[in-house]
Amino acid sequence: MEQNTLKTWAECAPKLIAVASGRDTADLVIRKGQWVNVHTREVLADHDIAISEGRIAYVGPDASHCIGDDTEIIDANGRYMIPGLCDAHMHIESGMLTPAEFARAVIPHGTTTMFTDPHEIANVLGREGVRMMHDEALLQPINVFTQMPSCAPSAPGLETTGFEITPEDVAEAMHWPGIIGLGEMMNFPGVVNADPKMLAEIAATQAAGKTVGGHYASPDLGPAFHAYAAGGPADDHEGTCEADAIARVRQGMRSMMRLGSAWYDVETQITAVTEKGLDPRNFILCTDDCHSGTLVNDGHMNRVVRHAIECGCDPLIALQMATINTATHFGLERELGSITPGRRADVILTSDLKALPIELVIARGKTIAQDGKCLVDCPHYNWPESSRQTVNMGVNRISNDFIVPAPEGANRVSVNVIGVVENQAPTKALKAELDVKDSRVQMDLANDVCQIALVERHRALGTTTNAFVSGFGYEGDMAMASTVAHDSHHMIVVGTSREDMALAANRLSEVGGGVTVFKDGKELALVELPIAGLMSDQPATEVAAKAQKMVEAMEACGCTLNNAYMQHSLLALVVIPELRISDLGLVDVTKFEMTDVIQAHT
């Protein structure tokens, strides 16, 4: 299937000039709208837009000279005409959807451009997996740019992935047509310590004239942060407070403020603009991770812009942060991000700049959504069988793999516990005193301490690592298992019953990946994710319905956290403090070293 291409400006410049001057006629004219100009931060009433060959030819008070017999006319009726929204940093796989189905889900919400980092699939299928995502992205009727993942594994020596990404892979990918830059540089200790591999990836990206994504997940804004900034990343989305945002823009980075399904980091950082008065052009909005339920029920970038406005941001500034600021950051200011001549004709009509109802969406000069309905086809890539056979756990079923043996003679042990923090990516490093019975360390459900395990699923090694987690509030006998376990994407299992944990793990092995919840020996919910154990190629509405049952199942097991699944899936992300689990054991991310589960015993 051929990619969904748009003529370059050079190819259609003669036509654009002819239409703007009145010597030729436009394909489409939008009449009598309020032009939201994100270059000047103005709203100009009674303006028209003339579009030809998928690009904007003219914006002004009267486009009647651009209209011919075959020109389509859309009457804006005084509505606001705003640029299509851009998501500056996101992972399609987090939606449990393929690029095609993700695009279909977000188009009605006004998203016309996405900058995606497929490092989830890179950990499972390597460079070829990235290429599959890249190729399906190019088929879509909106702009889906791909960042070449930088860190698979995210932290070498602390986890084992299905594949690794090398500097040679990065250098090759810079020649692919849809590659816009390097994905988030999560191995920030590697950059701080001038690791040759990390610097080679950054150098290859900069040599290609493309953007290096950042990821500095540390509260330390001292010399280590300055060393990271010197290492080349051009942006960062891991800030969680005003000081983080200010530090990044002062060092020449763009501060990307995220509102995903579970990460709420806009409100705590946007005060750098709304109260401190910093230049807003260096601030960008993004989602990072949104699951299908959020996309179907709440929105996408329109949700983020509305939230920024609710946090006190001027609506026009919030729109800049989701349009022109993003385009400029990626070197695409002449291509998209504003309603101005020569740019891609990505336009939204809305009747309210604060509530931001998305009433009509135009991308590349064609109407693609109206009143919440997607009106275009989003073509699928022909995913090979190799992408659907990725849960490799060998021939033996999981049985007694979730036992935590106690030291000989121990009656009670002191353990390290991963502490979940609601609506935040970081965890807390907690301590707990646990009983020992039959030489096995017991959970403490009365104090919300249950078990967590990571089951190796890439090479059928048959290994399982066990630890303890707190914060989910689970009650009774239950287990939740997922082959989405950022970033190594082994199988992560959390439960209060070792028997249910085994049932859940074996179930995902049977279906080829996904998420399941068991309670009292029975399955309450299942979301099948056959592609790389990460994604479904079914429509977002169907996946969201299954995901909602998963949420309800977690609630039935006692969990009331907001978007607890996102917290669950990130407990193996060994580049975000404080404590995580990997296939190699428990990881102290404040020190980037392994640590023992059991600290002491009596």
Image (cartoon, grey):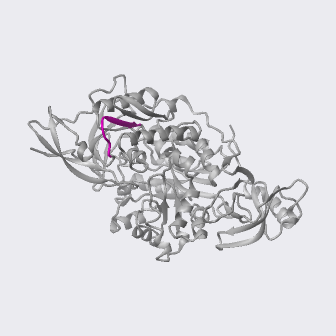
Q: Is residue 240 magenta?
A: no
Identify the residue at horizontal 34%, vertical 59% (top origin): 193
**Residue furthest toward the right?**
69
Magenta range: 473-482
The vertical placement of 511 against 371, above or below, is above
Give whichever of 67, 457 is nearer the camera.
67
**Residue furthest toward the top?**
395
Residue 107 place in picture, x, y as percent? 64, 50
Res 300 visible: yes
Identify the residue at horizontal 58%, vertical 49% (top origin): 175
Quarter of the image with the N terminus is: top right
Q: Is residue 141 left or right of residue 151?
A: right
Q: Is residue 190 left or right of residue 338?
A: left
Give whichever of 84, 381 is nearer the camera.
84
Give whichever of 64, 334 is nearer the camera.
64
Residue 154 place in picture, x, y as percent? 39, 48
Residue 528 place in picture, x, y as percent? 49, 33
Q: Is residue 51 left or right of residue 468?
A: right
Res 234 visible: no
Residue 542 place in picture, x, y as percent? 56, 37
Quarter of the image with the C terminus is: top left
Number of numbered discs overlaid on the protein picture: 0
The vertical placement of 530 against 59, above or below, is above
Identify the residue at horizontal 73%, vertical 58% (top origin): 9
